[in-house]
Image (cartoon, grey):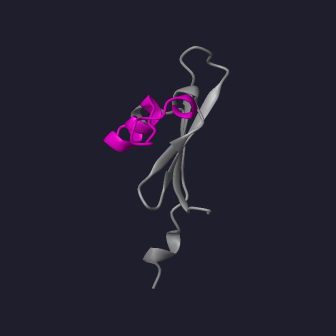
């Protein structure tokens, strides 16, 4: 199942500035991240989160990331 990615944020690792993590936001509003916090921690209900995905959920990812890319199709605005 390939979900459509809408945005990607890159965050520098706190413990190692040479490591970057990517947090993805899908068009259905869900997020995923490739940091250890995300991959190792699963909540009782099966959901996952990390500080990076929480930044995205809270709408402040742009303040913390080192880069962001928007994959939203731009053709919505064309007539």
Q: Quadrant of residue 77?
A: bottom left
Q: Position of residue 73 (x, y in %)?
A: 53, 68
Q: Residue at x 45, y 85 (%)?
A: 79
Residue visible at 43% across and 42% down?
Answer: 47
Query: 47 or 70, which is in the foreground?
Result: 47
**Residue placed most toward the observer, 10 or 54:** 54
| x, y percent for residue 25 | 48, 51
Q: Residue furthest bottom?
A: 79
Q: How many marks?
A: 0
Indicate the position of residue 43 as horizontal and vertical percent values.
42, 35
View extreme (right): residue: 18
Viewer-proximal residue among 39 and 60:
39
Q: Quadrant of the N terminus?
A: bottom right
Residue 21's place in the image compared with 45, above or below, is above
Q: Which residues are magenta?
A: 38-60
Q: Is residue 45 magenta?
A: yes
Taking the view exactly as shown, the residue that stands out farthest to the left is 58
- Determine which quarter of the picture holds residue 59: top left
């Amino acid at each position: 199942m390939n979900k459509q990615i809408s945005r990607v944020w890159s965050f520098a690792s706190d413990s190692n500035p040479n490591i970057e993590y990517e947090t993805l936001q899908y068009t259905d509003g869900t997020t995923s991240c490739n940091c250890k916090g995300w991959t190792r921690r699963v909540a009782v209900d099966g959901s996952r989160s990390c500080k990076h995905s929480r930044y995205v959920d809270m709408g402040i990812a742009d303040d913390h990331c080192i880069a962001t890319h928007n994959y939203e199709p731009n053709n919505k605005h064309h007539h």
